[in-house]
Image (cartoon, helix red, strand yellow):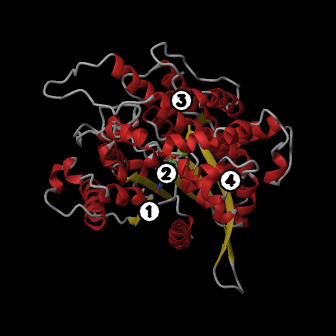
Amino acid sequence: MPTSKRLRVSEDDPLTRAIAPPSYETPQERDDRLAAEQEAKRVSDAIDDELNKQRISEKKGPKAIKILLLGQSESGKSTTLKNFQLMNSPKAFRSERASWRAVIQLNVVQSIHAILDLMSKAHSSAHNPPISSQPNTAPKEYPPLNPDHLKLKMRLAPLLQVEAALMKKLLPNGHVPLSSNPAQSFPTQQEISVNSSASWKNTFNRLMGRNSCDSADLIDWSDPDDPGVVLNACAEDMKRLWTDPVIQALMKVEKMRPEEMAGFFLDALDRVTSPRYIPTDDDVLRARLKTLGVSEHRFTMKTGPMGSPMSHDWRVFDVGGQRSLRAAWVPYFDDMNAIIFLAPISCFDQVLQEDPSVNRLADSFLLWKAIVSNPLLKKTELILFLNKCDILRAKLASGIRLADYIVSYGSRPNDFESASQYLKKKFAGLLKEHSPDRLYYFHLTSVTDTKSTTYILENVQDVLVRDNLRRSALVT
Ligand SMILES: Nc1nc2c(ncn2[C@@H]2O[C@H](COP(=O)(O)OP(=O)(O)OP(=O)(O)O)[C@@H](O)[C@H]2O)c(=O)[nH]1
Ligand SMILES: [Mg+2]
């Protein structure tokens, strides 16, 4: 859950701080990192082989245009990749919607799980009032829960089995990373992550024992064990929980804002729990699945006038943004045409999940600094997406003040225009300081919005095609 933290920008060497593995890793983080590095190496070797083949047949066409998506975890990299897929391979994108159904169901259950955990916390604090560990800070005062809330909580308990079943279905080795915490009445939840988007979809389809292109055919609608059955049965109770004024007040005390969190579907419960639910394109963009390894998406696009179009091959690489996974980025720095760097600017009041001592915006500044000053990326086009603008807009409008987290923001108006321009200048300033005279492209984005993102990505593609042609002209 995001907690508040004042912005702290470190002056340490950005590369060491941002890209090197953290000094302390949990065994799970270490395993994740090693697995990601191995996967990165395997993919990188395969790319080298492919490049060699490509060079041999170079006469057949211009080199593929390569884009690397970078940014911290939950910055919107995989969502941007999905937009590329939706634009350029809509059939393939839509054929995968059945696989995303399970992810969305898991996202729903996990949002409910987070609220149930908060209820447990409030309940136990009412019976054993905590003593504040911080001087001059009063312990949180939660609104009291009544017996109906506790009954509701018990009625929703079957969702936790659904959560375990969905995780089992989605994880390739069937391992369910749920650990029981004896202090809580429910098991603690963990975020599910995948090594590459292709492999979990294959696993899922194999499990379903189908090989069809139609999303609806991939779902066994008569299966009594389908998670959709329990979700549908619990729909009314989930809605009751989410809209209950005491629960809303409880979340307010805890500064918990599920609507800003990854994979939020509680505002669409009727639809996503309906008996024959198939995700829409927008649902797939909003679904959250953390990336562990590196995913690659290839497509071919025609540009130029109708009479003489030119065909270009594209490759877009998506990586995991969590700190422990960033070392796996480096093998991809070589030979990229462009980097799309995503900085989620709505996160100014949040901390990193993997290191709660670090403010998320400060981490984005550090990462951007590391990327712009990296010698391997000197010739790479930089495209900066200041992302999650929709959330920033809503957050500022709700009264959360940017100046409370960035002191230098001072008395500027707490509105979207001033805040986004100020943050843009901060990123531009870092570029100017660490890579003077370098051009970059910049966009204010909400990559869950397909329409505006398609427009921006078409513009990005245009710029890169022209740049690629200019470079090939210079080479020959
Ligand atoms: N409202 C809103 N949600 C967004 C936006 N961009 C991404 N999201 C959501 O934020 C969540 C995280 O996005 P991802 O694309 O999975 O993030 P990522 O950068 O790939 O994260 P890692 O794989 O952990 O590195 C998803 O649920 C997205 O739907 C945005 O602009 N607005
Ligand atoms: Mg991702």
Mark-to-mark CA distance, 4 and 3: 27 Å
Q: Secondary structure at mark 4?
A: loop
Q: Residues within 10 Å of mark 4 (few under 14, many from 20)?
A: many
Question: Along the horizontal axis of the image, is 476 left or right of 132?
Answer: right
Q: Can see residue 199?
A: no
Marking on residue 130:
none
Find ligand 2 in the image and state its quadrant: top right
Residue 15 placement (x, y as % from top left): 34, 39
In this rendering, the answer to whether 270 lies above or below 205 is below
Q: Residues within 10 Å of mark 1 (few under 14, many from 20)?
A: many
What residue do we see at 42% from left, 35% from top? 323
Q: Which residue is mark 2?
A: 76
Residue kind at label 3, given as amino acid type: Lys
Q: Is mark 4 within 8 Å of ligand 1?
A: no
Q: Which residue is mark 1?
A: 445
Mark-to-mark CA distance, 1 and 2: 10 Å
Question: Along the horizontal axis of the image, is 183 left or right of 209?
Answer: left
Residue kind at label 1, given as amino acid type: Thr
In this rendering, the answer to whether 286 lies above or below 444 is above
Q: Is mark 2 within 8 Å of ligand 1?
A: yes
Say which of 446 and 372 sits in front.
446
Q: Which residue is mark 4?
A: 279
Residue kind at label 2, given as amino acid type: Gly
Question: Along the horizontal axis of the image, is 117 left or right of 127?
Answer: right
Q: Secondary structure at mark 3?
A: helix
Q: Are marks 1 and 2 in contact (CB under 8 Å)?
A: yes
